[in-house]
Image: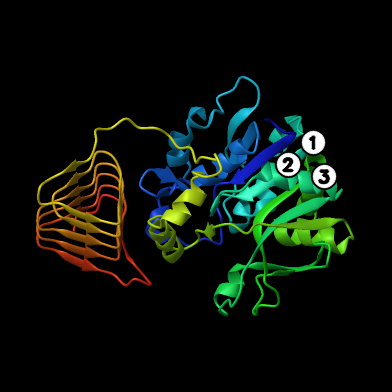
């Protein structure tokens, strides 16, 4: 059932540091889980929540993302009215760091926002992985008669390094936001903003215009915190399910290995809630397992050829693990090849990597080794 809400997803996050994995593609287009892209989770959440018009901003390196999304058919978003919109960057003739800040991005898509008919708007980063019902968040937003509703989750015992990646919320007994601590040096509360909020579309446009004309750049500080300081009604809604923010090689690696846990898969892919995660479908041949193959606790996509040993790993389509090779705690993207008698442990391969016979690559479980796209080792 559709609702009166427009969706906007940022395909990039300037705070994410993904190294080789985002050198040639948008953060939203990074492959995960054997057959998905990061964008699939947030996009599917919006579709499952009855949102029928979604815009995806594309500041840089967006060819891979647009190839994946196409017309939006895989998400039932190839519609005559509304549907999926790819929003390219505004051509300012300049190139600077500020151009990827949230205020600039929203300001750049003002024509899209102005032409939309939905009264409410949901804005989200692409790289928070969860399965969430935004229709319920909208209902609470309306019940509270709020100006803004922020989604948050509980975090605890953050290190001094990790806390700088969080925006923490002070809440009163009615879950109204009384203050925001933006990337603080120490943890002052357990309430962590998940970079998702709902508000009225026209209110957001007005606040973005004000911020833009006054040289402001950050949504969190110059829209949301300003709303709190201006005594607008800013409410918070807690999400208590599985969530993972992918903003580093370590978090990317950790999320993929989380998918090997049944309870995570059941929740994340909506097996118990009928809230599936959609992705672009590719018809390929089944995976072939030789008599010498040994596979344990792994996710193997279609079109692979397994002759060696694979443990606790995720293999994308078309991966070949030759006889005598051992792959353990690894993420191997599409069409990678591990030749005979290799040992690969705690390693991430981008697409099309070839590891020649007899080689040994071992990363740390806390900091996996990353091999870039189509590299021959």
Residue located 69% across and 34% down the image: 112
Using the numbered discs, state the Cα–Cα distance from disc 1 to disc 2 in whole angstroms.
7 Å
How many numbered marks are there? 3
Measured as percent of width and height from the top left, residue 47 is found at 60, 36
Is residue 321 placed above or below 77 in the rendered structure?
below
Which residue position is annotated with label 3? 142
Q: Nearer the viewer, residue 267 or 134?
A: 267
Q: Residue furthest front?
A: 272
Q: Which structural element holds mark 1?
A: loop
Report whether 118 appears left or right of 69: right
For residue 289, what is the image quadrant? top left
Callout 1: 10 Å neighbours few (<14), some, many (20+)? some
Whole-number angstrom distance, CA of label 2 to CA of label 3:
13 Å
Q: Nearer the viewer, mark 3 or mark 1?
A: 3
Q: Residues within 10 Å of mark 2 (few under 14, many from 20)?
A: many
Q: Could you tell which of marks 3 and 1 lies nearer the N-terminus?
A: 1
Give the percent coordinates (x, y) of residue 140: 78, 48
Q: Quadrant of residue 157?
A: bottom right
**Camera-nearest residue between 338 and 272:** 272
Q: Which residue lies under the disc numbered 2? A: 121
- The secondary element bearing badge 2 is classed as strand
Quadrant (top left/top right/bottom left/bottom right) for the N terminus: top right
Tell me residue 179's x, y (percent).
Answer: 79, 68
């Amino acid at each position: 059932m559709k609702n009166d809400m427009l969706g906007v997803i940022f395909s990039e996050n300037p705070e994410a540091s993904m190294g080789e994995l985002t050198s040639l593609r948008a953060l939203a287009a990074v492959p995960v889980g054997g057959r998905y892209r990061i964008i699939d989770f947030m996009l599917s959440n919006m579709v499952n929540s009855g949102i029928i018009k979604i815009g995806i901003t594309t500041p840089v390196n967006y060819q891979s993302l647009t190839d994946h999304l196409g017309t939006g058919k895989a998400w039932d978003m190839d519609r005559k009215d509304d549907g999926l919109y790819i929003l390219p960057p505004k051509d300012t003739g300049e190139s600077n760091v500020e151009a990827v800040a949230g205020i600039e991005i929203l300001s750049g898509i003002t024509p899209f926002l102005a032409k939309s008919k939905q009264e409410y708007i949901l804005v989200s980063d692409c790289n928070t992985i969860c399965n969430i019902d935004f229709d319920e968040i909208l209902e609470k937003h309306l019940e509270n008669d709020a100006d803004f509703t922020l989604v948050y989750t509980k975090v605890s015992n953050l290190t001094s390094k990790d806390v700088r990646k969080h925006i923490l919320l002070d809440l009163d007994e009615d879950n109204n936001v009384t203050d925001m601590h933006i990337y603080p040096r120490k943890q002052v509360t357990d309430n962590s903003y998940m970079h998702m909020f709902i508000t009225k579309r026209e209110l957001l446009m007005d606040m973005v215009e004000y911020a833009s004309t006054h040289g402001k750049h950050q949504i969190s500080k110059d829209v949301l915190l300003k709303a709190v300081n201006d005594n607008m009604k800013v409410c918070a809604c807690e999400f208590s399910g599985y969530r993972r923010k992918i903003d580093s090689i370590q978090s990317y690696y950790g999320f993929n290995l989380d998918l090997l846990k049944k309870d995570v898969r059941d929740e994340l892919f909506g097996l118990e809630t009928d809230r599936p995660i959609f992705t672009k479908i590719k018809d390929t041949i089944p995976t072939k397992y030789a008599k010498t193959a040994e596979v344990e606790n792994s996710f193997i996509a279609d079109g692979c050829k397994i002759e060696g040993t694979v443990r606790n790993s995720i293999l994308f389509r078309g991966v070949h693990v030759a006889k005598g090779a051992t792959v353990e705690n690894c993420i191997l993207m599409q069409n990678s090849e591990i030749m005979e008698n290799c040992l690969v442990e705690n390693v991430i391969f981008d697409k099309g990597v070839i590891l020649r016979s007899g080689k040994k690559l071992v990363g740390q479980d806390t900091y996996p080794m990353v091999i870039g796209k189509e590299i021959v080792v």
